[in-house]
Image (cartoon, rainbow, N blue to C red):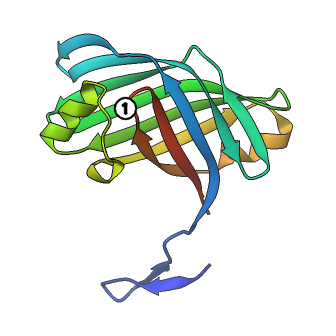
Amino acid sequence: MSVTAHPRGMSHPAPPPLAFFATLKVQVAPAHEVGQTPAGNRRIIAILGGDARGDGWTARVLPGGADFQAIVTPTLAQLDARYVLETDAGELIYVHNRAIRSASAETTARLIRGEPVDPAEVYFRCAPTFETAAPSLAWINERLFVGVGVRRPDWVEIDCFTVL
């Protein structure tokens, strides 16, 4: 572990590096618009399928999960997606992905309408957790992950990284 100087003259561990874990491509249905609630404009988006590709492994996204969204301001969405991956070996991985998506009010409105948006116009960052009972993948239960996402009209692509 390397050490860096802290602004107050004290030493602290260096920021942790990241290592690629997987790219998740999640197919989504049109949103169910719940409407304005105290938490924001609630939207529920069903997860229909998709795939995951990691270093030396692949999986499919099982249908049945959902992304529970709150559009809290005209520029900020809080996302909470939950779904399951099934690896090619038949192992199951529960995914819980909390994210924020921020963009101009105009870009956010286009995303909500399901229109294509240039990913460069959107800040989409997440902190997914992965849980499994599979012994060969048990290490993922003990790691932190971060990711960056892109929203397309009918799918979401997320690059996930392990915090080393």
Locate residue 93 relative to residue 46 in the image: left or right.
right
Residue 79: image location, x then y, percent: 37, 32
149 or 153: nearer the viewer: 153
Locate residue 139 relative to residue 148 in the image: left or right.
right
Q: Amino acid at mark 1?
A: Leu
- Tell me the residue at 70%/48% (across/down): 54
Classify mark 1: residues with Cα within 10 Å, few (<14), some (14-19) or many (20+).
Answer: many
- Tell me the residue at 62%/57% (across/down): 20
Residue 94: image location, x then y, percent: 64, 28
Quadrant the N terminus occupies: bottom right
Residue 141: image location, x then y, percent: 68, 42
Residue 92: image location, x then y, percent: 74, 27
Q: How many marks?
A: 1
User: Which residue, as the protein is rendered here, is positioned at the far front?
Assistant: 116
Q: In this rendering, does residue 151 appear at all?
A: yes
Residue at disc 1, secondary structure: strand
- Tell me the residue at 46%/79% (across/down): 12
48 or 84: nearer the viewer: 48
- Say if 122 sits above or below 27 in the image: below
- Residue under circle 1? 79
Q: Which quadrant would residue 93 be assigned to in this image?
A: top right
Q: Which quadrant would residue 42 be assigned to in this image?
A: top left
- Tell me the residue at 56%/69% (across/down): 17
- Say if 109 sits above or below 23 in the image: above
Locate residue 137 relative to residue 104 in the image: left or right.
right
